[in-house]
Amino acid sequence: MKIDIGIPEKNAQAVAFELNKVLADEVLLAAKTRNYHWNVEGPSFMELHKFYEGLYDELDEVIDEVAERVRAIGHYAEGRLVDVLKLTSLLENEYTNDSKKQLADLLSDHETMIRTLRKLITVFADDYKDLGNSDFVTGLMEKHEKTAWFIRSYLK
């Protein structure tokens, strides 16, 4: 069924493509966080184990929100792992149980997400005239900013 929500199809297609890249980054970030949850060791094991669990639970909700946003504008959410690996801008690192390395890696990824989302705020609003998705990615950026602050606090 044709969607008539006030966004030209070519703009909706461009926004969906960018949101699918965000989705891929969120999926990879959640997988990395879960991996660190499984493999963390050291004197802060239980605290970080629970912290990581909270982070990937939040990311799971974000993943669902992004995928549903793509569907709401009439496109497929690209959630196959082959698509995630093709679309993501994040990298997977070697296994480590070193909590400082894990936290530094997660901080870098969240800051990458923040920079990406900050750019998309104006791209969606100015280039694609999609204020709804501009607002949506603003909310995502704020979530990543808060998480980055929490992670940064562990690294001091």
Image (cartoon, rainbow, N blue to C red):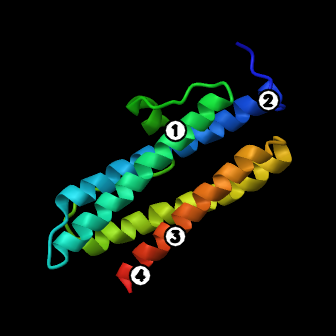
Mark linked to residue 5: 2
Residue that protrudes farthest toward the bottom in the picture: 156
Residue marked by disc 1: 87
- The residue under label 4 is which amino acid type? Ser
Say whether disc 4 or disc 2 marks the residue closer to the N-terminus. 2
* Displayed quadrant of residue 55: bottom left
Q: State if disc 3 and disc 4 touch (CB < 8 Å).
A: no
Q: What element carries label 3?
A: helix
User: Helix, strand or loop at disc 2?
Assistant: loop
Tell me the element at label 1: helix
The residue sitting at the top extreme is 1
Q: In this view, does 143 lie to the left or right of 85?
A: right
* Res. 91 visible in picture: no
Mark nearest the camera among 1 and 3 is 3
Look at discs 4 and 1 and give the one toward the viewer: 4
Please give the label number shown on residue 146.
3
* Quadrant in which the N terminus appears: top right
- How packed is label 3: few (under 14 Cα within 10 Å), some, or many (20 or more)? few
Q: What quarter of the picture does the C terminus occupy?
A: bottom left
Alpha carbon separation for disc pair 2 and 1: 26 Å
At a point 14% along the width and 79% down the height, the residue shown is 43
Specify which label sits upstream in the sequence, 2 or 1.
Answer: 2
Q: Distance between the residues labelled 1 and 3?
A: 25 Å
Looking at the rendered structure, the kind of residue marked 2 is: Ile
